[in-house]
Structure formats: C-alpha cells, structure tokens
Amino acid sequence: MMRNLLIGILLVTIMLGYSAFAANSRVSLSIDDIHSPVFNVKEIRASLSGQQLSQLEFRVGEIAVQEKIWRNVKLSCTKFQLTDRLIGCSGGRIHLSNSAPLAVEFHLNLYENVLEIEIKPTANESWRFSLHWNENYWRNTLTIANGQAVHVVQWLPDMETMPVPGKGRVNGNVKISGNMDGIARVAAELLIDDLAFSDRNGLRAGENVNMTINWSAEHSSRNNQWQWQSEINWLAGEIFWQPLFFSDGGYSLNLTGVLSENNINLNNGKIVLHDIGELDFSGVLARPGNNLIDFNLHATSLELSTLFDQILRPFLRSTAFSEMNVIGRGSFAWRYHQGENKSFVLDLHDVSLADRRERFAFYRVNAHIPWQANSATIADISILSGQVLRVPLGAVRVPLEINQSELRIPQLVLPVLDGKLKLENFIASQQDKNWHWQFNGELLPVSMEKLTRALQIQQMHGTISGVIPKVSYVNSIVAVDGTLLFKIFDGMVTANNLKLIEPLGLVPHLAVDLAMKNLDLDLLTRTFSFGNIQGRIDMEMQNLELAGWQPVKFDAKLSSSAGSYPRRISQAAVQNISALGGASAVAAIQRSFLRFFEEFSYSEIGWQCFLRNNVCRMDGIEPASILVKFESKGYVIVKGGGIPAITVIGYNRNVGWQELINRLKRITQGNDPVIQ
Amino acid sequence: MNKLFSCLILLVILLSLPLATHARGANIEINTPAITKLKQSMQQRHGQLASHYASGAIGLTGDGLIAMRDANVLPLAQRQPVNALIAAENQDRNALYQEIASANNHPEWEKDIRATFSQRWISLAKSGWWYQAANGAWAKK
C-alpha cells in the first residue's frame, strides 16, 4: 500500500514537472494528510526549483509510524534528476526531527525497477537500501558499513528497563525478499563491534561488546510456516545483567525453529557458555500467548566451579549457600511436557562443596539422582568425607528414595569421627515451597577428645553416645521431640525442649533444657585443669539460650549428687573456686589452714548462676550467715565436712558474663590462680 | 580518609543511640554477643559502602535496608561486587532487627524496631546521600 502511494505521489510530481518544465521555474505540491493502518503523514510540501528543476525541497510536518513520531522532516537535493524513467537525488540532506542533517542520495530507475537509497551520516558510515522488483518478485537489501548503533535508539520503545545502545559499530546486511503474496525470506548477517548499551538504571548494561548475528527465515506458503535458524556469537566484552556479570566473550546461541499459526517450535538449540560447557535444548511454545508447552534441556559434564560462581551464586546471595565453593563436574537432563515437569536427572562427578565459613563441607561426591513425576526412583549418592559445624564425617553411601516431592532414607549409618550416627526413617518433603524433614536415630560412642578438638573447644575425655528421638525441621527450626540422652563424664545428660533456629543462618539460635546427673568431678576437674575435686555433681541448666553459639540466658544450678562417694577437694581447686567467685574467700577462720594441707574434705558443693543481660547473678548452697557469724552477705559454695574440712564462701553476687569467662580461661589455662 | 572516619563515627553513634520505638518499652540499646558481632560486621563493611552512598549508587530504603539506586555511576565490573555488599549488609540488618527484638523477649517487635532504625538511618544520613521517601520515590538529602 505504501509503495502504491509513493508511486502515485511521484506520478503527480512527474506530471506537474512536465507541465511546468522551464528554466528557473518552480513546481510545488501540497498534500495535507495521508492515512494508512501502518502510518500517518501530515503536511507534505514538495517543491522543485532552480535550473531545469534540479533542486528539490521536501518537507513533512509529521510522520507517525505505530507509536513513533517524527516532526519537521526535511529532505533537500541539490542535484535532483527527473525523467520519465528516472528520479534521482544526489548531494541530498535529510533532517529527522531535531537531529543533525544526514547526507542522502537516492535513485529510482523505473526502467530497471530499482530503487537505491544511501544515507551517510558521516564520511565512513553508510546505510544503503536497495529494492529490486518485477511482476512476480521483489528483493530489499539493507547494507550497513560502519553503522553507528546509536541511530537505533530512536526506533526503540521508551522504557525504563529497555537497554539502549550508547555506542557501537554495525557492519553487514539485512535482506528481505518476497513475491506478490508477501515476504518469502528474511536474512541478516551482522557484525557488531565495540557495543555499549544500558538501561536507565544501569542494571542491564554492556561495554566493548563484539558479536556476530546470523539469522534467516524462509516462508513456506504450502503450510503457511516460517522455518528459521539463528546463530549469535558473543565474542568479547563485558555484560552486567542484574545480578549476573560476564567479563569475557566465548558464549554462543544456535537455534533452528518453525513458526506456525499455533506454535513456535524450537529445534536443535545449543548454548555454549565459556569455561562452563554446552547446553542443548528443544521445545514448543503455544501461540498467541507464547506459553511454554514442551521443553527438553540437557547438559553433559558442565564445569561446576564456573557455573556456580558466574550463574548460581548471584541468585543465592541471601542464602546459606552464598559463601560456598564448588568444584567438579555435573550433568543434568530436564523434561517438561504439556505444561508439567516430567523428569529431572542430575549426575555429579567428583564434586566437592565447601562453605567458606566452615559450616558444612562434602568432598568427592558422586551421585546419580533421577526424579520422575509419575513414579518412584532411587538415587545413588556417595560421599567420601565431609564436615558439619566442624564435626568431621566419614565416607557414606546414601540410598535415597524419591517419590515425587518426598525423599526417604530408611536407614543410614554415618561415620562421625571414631563413632557413628545411625539415622532411621528420614523423610523430607516439600510443603508450601518449604522443605520439612524428620528422622530418629542413635549416636554410637564418639570420643570426646576428638570431638572437642574438632569443635576447637576445651578438650574433654570420655565418650559421648545416646539415643536420638524424633528430630524434625519445619520453618527453619530443628526441633527434638522427646528427650535426648547421652553419657558424659561417667554421668547421664538429658536434653529436653531442644530447638535450633536457622542452623545455617547468620545468627543461629539454640534453646534447650539440660539436666546432668552424677557427673564424675574427678574426670571433670582433670579435664579442665581446675585442681582436683573428688565427688559427684548434678547440674540443671534450664532455659539455656545461645545466639550465634554464645549464651544469652540460662538458669544454672550445680549441686552435689545424692549418695555415698569420696568427697575431697585439693588446695588448688579451693583457690580456683575462690578466684571464680571473684571477691570470695575461704572462711577467715580456716584460711590459715590452706598452706598446711594439700587436700580437704567437704560435705556439699553448690553454685548457681542466673544469666540475664550479660550478667550472671550467683548464689550458693545457703547464706553464709548460717555457718559463719557476722557473714551477712556471702553464700556458701563449698560446705566443709570431715577432717580437715574447708568452707568456701562467695561474696560476688553479680559478675559480668565475659568477666566470668575470662576468669575461667585464666584458671583452665594453668595460670596462677587469683585469690582476692 | 577524614570522610571515611566521620562516616564510621556516624555509624557508631547511630548503633549506640538509645532509640524510642513504637513498641513501648523496647530497649534498642540492648546488647548480646550476637548483636555486638552484627554491629562489628556492619561497622567493618561501612568503610566499603560509604563512597557508594555518597556517589548515589546505593540508597537507604524505607524498610531499614539498602538498595542499588543507580548502578550507572559504577564501572561495569564493580556492579556485581557492590550487589554482594548490599546483600551482606541487608542480611546483617535483618538479623540485627530480629536479634534486638528477641533480646527484648518480644520477637514480634521486629517490625517496629526496623521502622525506628529506618527513620534514624535516614535522619542521620549525610547530605547528598539518597533515601527512599514515604511514597517510595528516591530523594536526595
């Protein structure tokens, strides 16, 4: 339609030209409006003047194509040629809106049916358009030489998130050909150099980008389909596409496909990612909404370190995996059919995952993990070694049963240091997009010496073992339902109401009520280099709360266990208890005995600490006033009994938690005790 | 250097200010080892963030966090590292608000504590820094 209009206008011009042909004459043409479904043009003014009407002035008030509008478009030709077969313009200049004038030439040869237009914004830059046609066939070619990408900006929609080129050079051609029925073939071969682009906020931007684009499509009138193929190679440059950043080229996309009235078929798709590997894909989208119906994606032997660093980590910034290092190779295959996930298979080959903050690590993981939408499968996962919260784990093979969104491990024996953790009835499932899991089990004896060394805390002796009742994980909380039992220092420890909130979060919270019964003081004091105490104690630690593994609250009560057993305390232990209690003292009347005896008898030990707001409020067995006259403020920590007997009284009621820890450190590190 | 130092002082002042909250009786000055650790982490990171507040790359949001406001002022290669800084800072801030609420034995006060901190971050921001106004639009202080 546009072509017909153009020819019509030209014919009018030609006729006017013939009728008024004379030296220094002037011919003018005015058209107020031209309307079409594709464009609207207003205020067209054309005039020919000068010697043999060789100068053209052509002005358009407004051209609107879709939503794009240009105003005050001007074309002038200093050498305009008009014959019955030829219209030509040399030395022309075109003004588009307020932009700088561009050099332009055009020639329309009606004898050979050729139209050629060349725009040269600068001496080295050329946008050359040619149109050839006959009764059955037409062919357009746009040839670009050193075209500046910035010219494209005015054709792009004005959107905040639309990246627009700031600079860049385009070379190549775009060819469109067809017949009287319409377009039959489109092809583009473009080389883009030194491209810079950005959206308004700089969240989708590139610099120094070099790329090639080869794209072609052919129309089949037999079944009204377009068959197309494309090859895009990103050769060099940097691209930031929030949150991803690629600093080098080496990426490509190859794709063939078929566009029909109802579908878009993607065939033989291949994405090559530099230093990562290749992904192959195919799929079907339903028109007109372009909804994904089918999709197959698979990749073999991807380099996981670069895949994780470049593509996955930026999306995991706010999770526990943001500081994870990954090495090894992985393969996967995903099948999506008729709008649903049908299968996913993941294979890991010698993969190691390690958290930089040492919260977890798994080394030499080999796995085949298949998932099917409509049937149960069994995954085979083997791990050579690992650690969780610094506790080393040994080699393990995990028989994981997968049934849709539920995972099960009937039984698993996990080596932990020199012991074992037996897990039974492990079930994990996804509910409301969150993972829940639970298990029960048993901890078979683990050396306390090895465990404390691994945890980098005060070394202890003996073993730890126990029964693990139901443990569950819901809404980022690990909860133990029941009583956790384990043995330590020849006594029994029970843990109730245990909850671990966000165990891999920035500030994990632990809440538990602990009760320790019949601990052997001899083992305990030897472990902590506290001097020697023989006897047995019970310790209640209710409402214990740790934040970031540091205590913020507890109600601790230590007392001698019931029963008959030796009750002896060494001179060093007496001095250390005194030091721990701050301004405490051995009962004045007994102080002079200290230097004469290495060991004393006692009848009872008792100490309490209620931690709130970083302050430990201390108490003992009973007020000192009961035992000692005129002692109205103190409390008894060690109550004497037998010969030689000693009584230790504490005077400090409130001690800063950090100060108490510092005192303990001084004592257990073997420094000289401080007696105040 | 002086600029950095004054920014650090500003941050220290802010973190140690007793603040009033909508949750009557909340002690925002409360300290626990976890809160101390979070504050230290934020103070250490502030040295890296200060220049980005001043350049307008980063702005203070209305919910007590920070966000990339205009990445154009950053070289392309710096945009992802600054994203990582923002994510780490926001993790600390979220944890700080939650920890202060928990230390007050009222985890449900987190929203009020966040709102109070948000107002204070903005009121104590330096001239030229960007913040999100009540209507969500960016404004320059």
Image (cartoon, coloured by chain):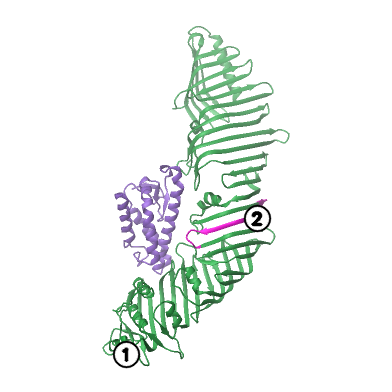
Chain colours: A green, B purple
Residue B34 placed where, x, y %? 40, 65
Residue B132 against residue A449 in the figure, above or below: above
Is disc 2 placed on a helix, strand or loop? Answer: strand
Residue A73 against residue A651 in the figure, above or below: above
Residue extending farthest to the right is A222
Task: Please give left or right for residue A651 compared with residue A17 in the image.
Answer: left
Mark 1 and mark 2: span between their CA atoms? Answer: 74 Å
Give the number of the disc on residue A345: 2
User: Quick one: label 1, few (<14), some, or many (20+) residues within 10 Å?
Assistant: few
Residue A350 position by quadrant: bottom right
Name the amino acid type tagged 1. Ile
- Assign the N terminus of chain A to one quadrant of the image: top right
Residue A644 position by quadrant: bottom left
The secondary structure that most of the magenta stretch takes on is strand
Q: Residue at x 65, y 52 (%)?
A: A333
Query: Is label 1 in contact with label 2 (beta carbons under 8 Å)?
Result: no
Task: Please give left or right for residue A674 compared with residue A377 in the image.
Answer: left
Residue A654 in sight in this render: yes
- For the record, the magenta segment spans A335-359
Magenta residue check for A344: yes
| Parent chain of label 1 | A
Residue A180 position by quadrant: top right
Give the number of the disc on residue A189: none
Residue A75 in sight in this render: no
Residue A302 placed where, x, y %? 60, 50
User: In the image shown, does A479 or A520 lie closer to the viewer?
Assistant: A520
